[in-house]
Amino acid sequence: MENTNTQNRRSFLKSSALAGGGLMLSFSWFANAQAADKMVAMNLPDQWNELNGYIKITPDNVIKIICPNPEFGQNVMTSLPMMVAEELEVDWKNVVVEMGTHDSVKLGTQFTGGSNSVRMYWKPLRNAGASARQMLIEAAAQTWGVPASEITTKAGVLLHSSGKSAKYGEMANKAATIPVPKEVKLKAPKDFSIVRNSQKNTEGQKIVTGKPLFGIDTHVEGMLIAMIQHPPAFGMKLKSFDASQALKMPGIKDIFSFKLYDDGFVQAGFDTRTFNEMIAIVGKSTWEVMNARKKIKVQWEAAGEIKETMMGRGGKREVTIPSRLETTSSQMELMAEYANGRHSAKPAQQLRKDGDPETAFKNAAQIIERTYNAPFLAHNTMEPMNFFAHVSEDKALVAGPLQAPGLIEPTLTKILNLPADKIEIQMTRMGGGFGRRAYGQYAFEAARISQRMKAPIKLIYSREDDMTYGIYRPMYTATYRAALDANKNLIAFHVKGGGIPENPIHANRFPAGAVDNYLAEGWEIPSNITIGAFRAPRSNFNAAAEQSFLDEVAEAMGKDPIAFRLDLLKRAKENPVGKNNEYDADRYAGVLELLREKSGWGKPENSGKKRGVAAYFCHNSYAGHVVDMVIRDGQPYVEKVTSAIDCGVVVNPDAAINMVQGAVVDGIGNSFYGALTHKDGAAEQSNFHNYRIIRHNEAPKIIDVHFIQNDIDPTGLGEPPFPPVFGAVANALYKSTGKRYYNQPFTVEGTKL
């Protein structure tokens, strides 16, 4: 296999510890792991905690840091090792980074998502580096017969005032026998020399030179290619098929139907799948398989109502999946009925209530009410969905682009009827994720097909397969209301939101805590259209609607949009309402103030610009944007974006700037163009010819990114900059056209503005 390590997990750990006669340190998040010499390494403990960083030092002083987390472009392959290297005190040029294989016992779930990688690894990996450094110091102290307190380190070299010195590699074997210190002192942020200094992507050269890094690159001798044929519409299932003609075509090995989950299977949280029974087409090449698939004669039928059992936080629960073939126009009508309380289903759930909003609205001098809508969105990862599997009677090797390898392991054990220690899961670099690759049904499909074929196979989705297969960003709506008194003071705020099939409301976020009378409600409509996490789940819509609405309220009150938000945040800081407010008002206000400064908001020289502003808190971070827009030939273009972010310590500044820039472009594209619609259960968009995404000439010419400088532990960055883009674009559109936009994508409301 050209790009996949075929060692099993235990042998991988042994060889990593023993190769070169060096030191490997495993650091557990919850407890100190054992530093091991060769004998101990041969008997590695069976139970490891969730998070481990691995440090390996060779005699020639090359430091290998094994990254435990999957990589899909957010650059954890650089930022996580940087944190280890900082405390280890090594020369970054001598660091080699390697992606670890999955080990559910020793490395936990290794989940990449929720903007958690840097935040959750910050202290564990720094502790790992500091512990290894202390062990090396102790080894040198014993060798030289001097107190450890007299030894210092610099760039991978141990130094003593007597003039003695040694490279880390020279002390690695002895250091491996030193017990892991129970406590280590970590550097103060002011002393960082690697963290907070931009480092190049450790895999950059491999990417630009086309080295096999991605799942789609996987190739082994004798490997077959598989594709699947799924029902053409949500709410349908396989009735029968005739593959007799397709089986005669060149290169085709087999065509068969299979069930993903057996009857009675209890689904875990990330076992989401759209269709349970599909047709697999297996052959020698992708081209041959694609051609054969066209020759299969298939009959589909209505699936009817389906009842499934799922695991949740409260244990097992029965879920009923409706049978209807859904159409977008009908979905919109149904959502409007729910939003207005006209539907016979249960009423909206109260999510938070402060004060007496009902009375405040009754006595208001003015009420502002607006409704916002957003469609389903497809993930459209750049690398097509794919997965490799080689399943035999007593073991399985699976490899591919995964956000959550630990979450697929329990399901693989069930569907393959193999124990976990007989299943090796290897992670390849992901060509995009955005939440789509947190759901492992494509890995399960590959494993099922390989088990049936008794051969290694690579499953490949075409773009059409993926776009019509579900696991979309949900369809949302929300109605916002604000009550003003006779002096145009904000006295009440009400948000009622829902969606198909989940609601978007974060009830305890701003402006909750800043208004005396506040009400948040949510409702949901069941659907057979499958949904899943999509970059900044729920926040990506909630921020768009909320930030658009706040601008309208500010205008009605005669206030500047930034000043209005800052006034609310001042209230939330000095005299907050309620006790469950998720955000830090000071940090939120700091982002708005930095944004105002860096964008020149309100300055006379910018008075002619058509600008929109928005800011939002999610994933423990604060982000805001000012969008400068122009209209050319009746079309809106974002010329410049100024961004301000508070995500605590910025580990790798250049990479962080790139992440914000990517979120900005992604947000502009989705707000202008993103939409996936359905007719009679079938997705109406199937590829980029009718699913519009942003193009190069439509991206901003300038994205000016600024970070709040503080020493707060790092928080999220992959997702937080994304949600406020939508609101900033909507507000800039209003300034550009004089019209408010309430339905995404905005260009659908009027192609010529």
Image: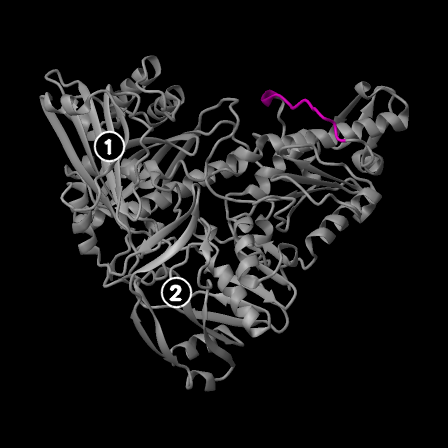
Number of the label disc, if any, that sits on residue 722: none
Instruction: State whether residue 239 is above or below residue 209.
Output: below
Between disc 1 and disc 2, the foreground one is 2
Tell me if mark 2 has few (under 14), some (14-19) or many (20+) residues whose alpha carbon lies within 10 angstroms of its own: some
Report the side of 342 relative to 527 (left or right): left
Left/right of residue 451 with respect to residue 587 in the rendered view: right
Q: Main secondary structure of the magenta part?
A: loop
Q: Residue 650: say if magenta.
A: no
To which residue does mark 2 refer? 465
Give the amino acid at mark 2: Asp
| Camera-nearest residue between 684 and 447 | 447
Which amino acid lies under the numbered mark 1 shown in the image of this protein?
A: Lys
Q: Please tell me whether mark 2 sits on a helix, a strand or a loop.
A: helix
Please state the horizontal and vertical placement of residue 135, each as a whole percent of the image: 78, 30
Q: Where does label 1 land, which residue?
A: 609
**Could you say whether the residue bearing mark 1 is in a helix, strand or loop?**
loop
In magenta stretch: residue 187: yes
Task: Write the start and end of the magenta stretch as one range.
Answer: 180-190
Q: Nearer the viewer, residue 173 or 311?
A: 311
